[in-house]
Image (spheres, rainbow, N blue to C red):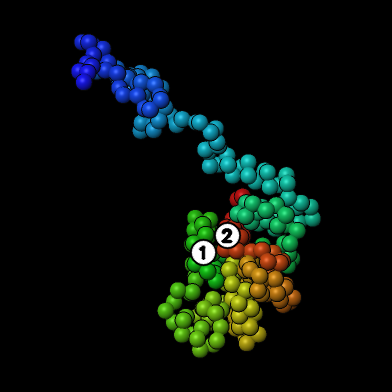
Amino acid sequence: MSPEKTAAPGRPVAGPAAPGGPVTAPAAPGGPVAGLAAPGGPVAGPVAPGGPVAEPYGYVRDGAEIYRRSFATIRAEADLAGVPDDVARVAVRMIHACGMVDLVRDLAWSPGVVATARAALLAGAPIMCDATMVAAGVTRSRLPAANEVVCTLGDPRVPELARRLGTTRSAAALELWRDRLAGAVVAVGNAPTALFRLLELMDEGGGRPAAVLGLPVGFIGAAESKQALADYGDLPYLVVHGRRGGSALAAAAINAIATEKE
């Protein structure tokens, strides 16, 4: 059995080779370590606090620049011809939330809905949301009057209300809106049953919201509930007709309406 090899003084010890691979030598004391920079050399790994960020992928890191380029791309690719300026700002935000520039072809609105909804927010109107995801997506710093963002879906009374009424929890949660509907801005971004129930509440003499953003998503009832809202009459609304919608779109619409800053 051969004696183990040792390095001459000041020389590195040859490490064992992987089967069929080259022999790698560990660094001598004080020498460079593979994968790390030598003293004074560039760092090819995690950056030390305060150091520059390595850019192996060359992606855009500046948040403001990302927004600027995104909105410029949307305005270049989306067909916004004939869309009023204030509605176009809302459409751009909604497209930014979903990545689909063709969304604008299904967008419908009543005249003056954006101005009406913004005036309500400026006056302190609450924002009534059908889903916690819609409420969570509202950027509070954009709200002009520290408006309250309300979602009653998690209220402990809702399950029993849903059982008693024979409906979904999303629809039953609107029973707790009755005293707050008048003059509110409503954002429905999840459940078609919630939008249908909203219209029923108004038929029953409930308060009329200042504006309704009807953007439920799905295959059952979504298109129909949005058409019912558009046909309701004398109620400011904004919808995306068809199956598309969602919490992100509803929150984006609120954020766009809340301030004229894009």
Q: Is residue 69 visible?
A: yes
SS for dot 1: helix
Q: Amino acid at mark 2?
A: Ala
Q: Quadrant of residue 106?
A: bottom right
Q: Residue at x 50, y 31 (%)?
A: 55
Chain-order first, disc 1 or disc 2: 1
Q: Determine whether the residue tagged by mark 2 lies in a helix, strand or loop.
A: helix
Residue placed most toward the observer, 179 or 43: 43
**Number of other residues with Cα within 10 Å of mark 1, as a class: few under 14, some 14 to 19, many 20 or more:** some
Q: Are marks 1 and 2 in contact (CB under 8 Å)?
A: yes
The quarter of the displayed image where residue 115 is located:
bottom right
Left or right: 137 with respect to 42? Answer: right
Residue in view at x 79 percent, y 55 percent:
82
Pick out the residue farthest to the right: 82
Q: Which image quadrant: the N terminus? A: top left
**Is 22 above or below relative to 65?**
above
Rendered location of residue 176, percent (x, y): 50, 80
Picture residue at 38% right of the left edge, 27% below the top: 19
Q: Is residue 6 above or below residue 127?
A: above
- Is 2 on the left-hand or right-hand side of 143? left
Q: Residue furthest bottom?
A: 164
Return the residue at label 2: 248
Residue 130 relative to residue 199: left or right: left
Q: Which mark is residue 133?
A: 1
Task: Using the image, tell me which numbered label, if any, was put on residue 100.
Answer: none
Q: What x and y, as percent, mark residue 94?
A: 64, 56
Hey, what amino acid is under mark 1? Met
**Alpha carbon distance from label 1 to label 2:** 8 Å
The x and y percentages for residue 83 are 76, 56
As drawn, the residue found furthest toward the top would be 9
Residue 97 point in image, percent of width and height: 60, 54
- For the point 55% across and 37% down, the residue is 60
